[in-house]
Image (cartoon, rainbow, N blue to C red):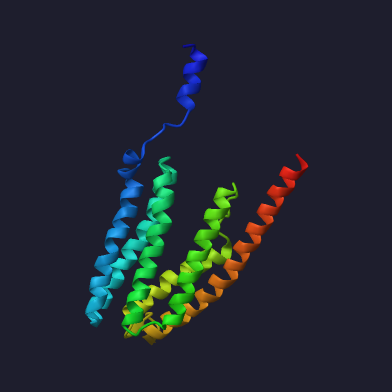
Amino acid sequence: MSDVSVEKAARLPKVRGLKEDAFNLPNILTMFRIVMIPVVMLMLQEGTPAMNFWAGWVYTFATITDALDGYLARKRGLVSVLGKFLDPLADKLLVMATLVLMVGMGRVPAWVVVIILARELSISMLRMIASSEGVVIAAGEGGKAKTALQMVAVLFLMLHHRYLVDFWFVEWNVDFNLAGLWLLYLSVFFAITSAGEYVKLFVEAVDAKNQRLGSS
């Protein structure tokens, strides 16, 4: 093999198998987030202020790993097919599982969770169809706002009770369940509007693809 061939081979990205990907640090963090879901749910079921508080801490730690695993995957060149599947799955499972549980606890109206679930399933199916057509639909600003609002809303709904929040110069008696509900309602608005954006992008991308194929 020539020196040029050796140099080209060295520059090629290393091909990793699924088993190897499963044990890299970003994916381990993602799987840890999935394992934390039943822990959070068991703590929430107790329903006491103390357990709500600790469930909120575990949930917060799990959401921090969401940002951390993505950063590590990009930093260390460990972006993988398995990670692309597990990361959004872990996020959705964490939010949806806790929301469904809190419907049964009377903290969240069922219709809100039905809309959120329907939206997530619809967009996931849309992306699957788009992928089969060779079209990639990136997350828009509305979708990112929806996700951020939902995560904060779920945390507030977990805390549930009224707490005296001290901001050094002012004290505020916060009803966290009410605050969480308003944030969740706002996330529903972004969920619906961003779903419309995704459909529009999908139609435009498929039309552009068909035009390219027709003109070739």
The x and y percentages for residue 58 are 28, 66
Q: Is residue 172 left or right of residue 196?
A: left
Image vertical order of residue 208 relative to residue 48, above or below:
above
Question: Which residue occupies the foreground of this view, 61 or 171?
Answer: 61
Left of 55 or right of it: where is 182?
Answer: right
- The answer to which quarter of the image holds residue 93 is bottom left
Rendering quarter of residue 52: bottom left
Q: Is residue 190 visible?
A: yes
In the figure, is residue 44 to the left or right of 71? left
Q: Relative to residue 24, is residue 93 depicted above or below?
A: below
Residue 193 % position (x, y): 59, 71
From this view, report whether residue 2 is shown above or below residue 79.
above
**Position of the C terminus by quadrant:** top right
Q: Position of residue 173 (x, y in %)?
A: 37, 88
Question: Between residues 137 and 133, which one lies in front from this camera angle?
Answer: 133
Q: Residue at x 50, y 22 (%)?
A: 8
